[in-house]
Image (cartoon, helix red, strand yellow):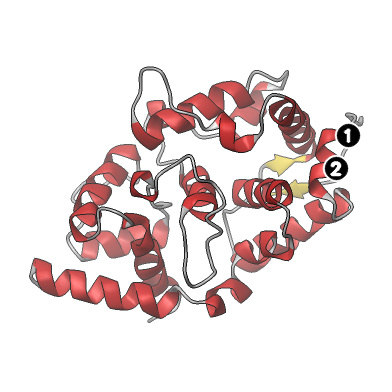
Amino acid sequence: MNKAELQEYLDFKSKQYNTRDFIDSDPIKLPHRFTRKEDIEIVAFLVSTIAWGNRTMIIRSGERILNIMGNDPYNFVVNYESTEHLDFVHRTFNGIDLDFFFRSLKNIYATGGLEKAFSNHSQIDGVKGRIVNFRDQFLATEHEKRSEKHISNPIKNSACKRINMFLRWMVREDKNGVDFGIWKSISTSELHIPLDVHTSRNARELGLIDRKQDDWKALEELMINLQEFDSKDPSKYDFALFGIGAFEK
């Protein structure tokens, strides 16, 4: 395919999968149960944090977190008192990590909330700087070293898949009702797609990435190419690259 044909193909696939039907089988279904901004973003952040592995398993673990919070996320977080043990495990994310996340979210909401925590970095531009700024604030709460691996660091060349997915959910103004678009302080043009096994494999097959590793440098390479197709909403192509890998043979 030449560049024009590739754009036409990706635009078509984005429209095919960026529909409300996508919600039913995706972890984004959990924050869609809520209407208050703070509830949506807390659930979205926690669910995106554990978003690795089988999507059915992710949704099941997300349901357990909702039960722990009594299905009242914001009130639970702002009134949270640390407990000795939270009965939760999802892959390598356990009760120790979840307790830290609850405590850190409580501190973040006491100082302006999640959206504010992703403010511009003083020295690093774009979404990379926003993630670094957020990570510094999130890790300011006392925690065990083991928990740091659950907040990826683009400075160490992580592709930050789960944080980028969370940001797409919060920022992207989606006329089809999948992404929420409730954060107005970040431009959709800044968003980077969550680089996972499906998106990276398909991006390489389509000639959108040359780099072999699934890291931040590969993600930047991909976004430069996708921004040529749509500079205002490049993250919409996540639906295409993910969909053709997850739903098509």
Quadrant of image for the N terminus: bottom left
**Could you say where residue 14 lies in the image, as x and y percent from the top left?**
36, 72
Residue 136 vertical placement versus 86 (above, below) = above
State the mark number for residue 79: 1
Can you see residue 224? yes
Q: State left or right for residue 182 relative to residue 226.
A: right
| Residue occupied by mark 2 | 75
Query: Residue placed farthest to the front in the image?
Result: 184
User: Residue placed at 68% from the left, 59% from the top?
Assistant: 31
As rendered, which of 140 and 95 lies closer to the eye?
A: 140
Residue 97 vertical placement versus 10 (above, below) = above
**Could you say where residue 20 lies in the image, as x and y percent from the top left?**
55, 76
As rendered, which of 177 and 56 lies closer to the eye?
A: 177
Query: Residue placed farthest to the left in the image?
Result: 2
Q: Amino acid at mark 2?
A: Asn
**Could you say where residue 134 lies in the image, as x and y percent from the top left?**
54, 29
Q: Amino acid at mark 1?
A: Asn
Q: Do callouts 2 and 1 mark residues in contact (Cβ within 8 Å)?
A: yes
How far apart marks 2 and 1 lie (CA) works out to 6 Å
